[in-house]
Amino acid sequence: MLETVQIENAGIVRDTGPDIALSDTIELCLKGDIRAQERLYRAFFPKMMALVKRYTGDPGEATEIVNNGFLRVFKKLSAYGHLGSFEGWVKKIVVNATADYFRYKKDTPEKFMAHLPEPRSNELHDKDNYKYLLSLLYQLPHTTRLVINLFIIDGYTYTEIAAITNISESTCRWHISHGRKILQQIIEKTRKQNNE
């Protein structure tokens, strides 16, 4: 089923004329319309940026990954069969771009807390919990963090994660188990330090 989301209502370029349906924007993109490509990019960039920031706390690195993802989206746009959610299709491509980025970047340093993305909730308590959770995830080894993000946060299956990361399903399970153990150790250590 084709989405009928209005591009104008998605919060993108407001001075380009009347509302344009997503399906019309996709068709214009397929014809090489640069303004339509920009509308599509602006409509989905914020969500894809938030997605990628869960994998990397560096805004510059996240922007690079998202932009590479959108290049893939535009190259593969003719393959979109108008079945299912277009946003889901874009998300899958961006997640694959993220996995590829980290697969080829072996020496990624840990990110600083200052770059953590903000949660949607306006409550300070929720923001603190969100930042704490992300700070825990950033302490995990790179591949383990990637697998846990894909499995727990994004809801991918072991089979899908194996395909995205080019590792076996059993290795995916190991990373999740290993990551949980590390997180439990970190939380227990933090609790002991807070009780002293």
Image (tube, rainbow, N blue to C red):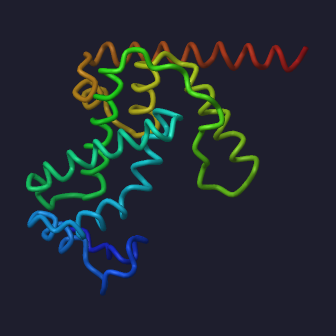
- Above or below — where is 190 with respect to 78? above
**Percent of width and height locating residue 47:** 42, 54
The relative height of residue 13 versus residue 121 in the rendered view (above or below) is below
- The count of marks equals 0
Residue 32 spot, x, y in % from top left: 12, 64
Instruction: Report the residue that reaches farthest toward the bottom.
Output: 18
Residue at figure coordinates x 60%, y 39% from the top left: 116
Residue 183 vs 159, above or below: the answer is above
Residue 10's quadrant in the figure? bottom left
Residue 194: quadrant of the picture: top right
The quadrant holding residue 95 is top left
Query: In the rendered image, which quarter contains the C terminus?
Result: top right
Left or right of 50? Residue 190 is right
- 102 left or right, relative to 46: left
19 is higher (above) or lower (below) than 63:
below
In this view, the residue farthest toward the right is 196
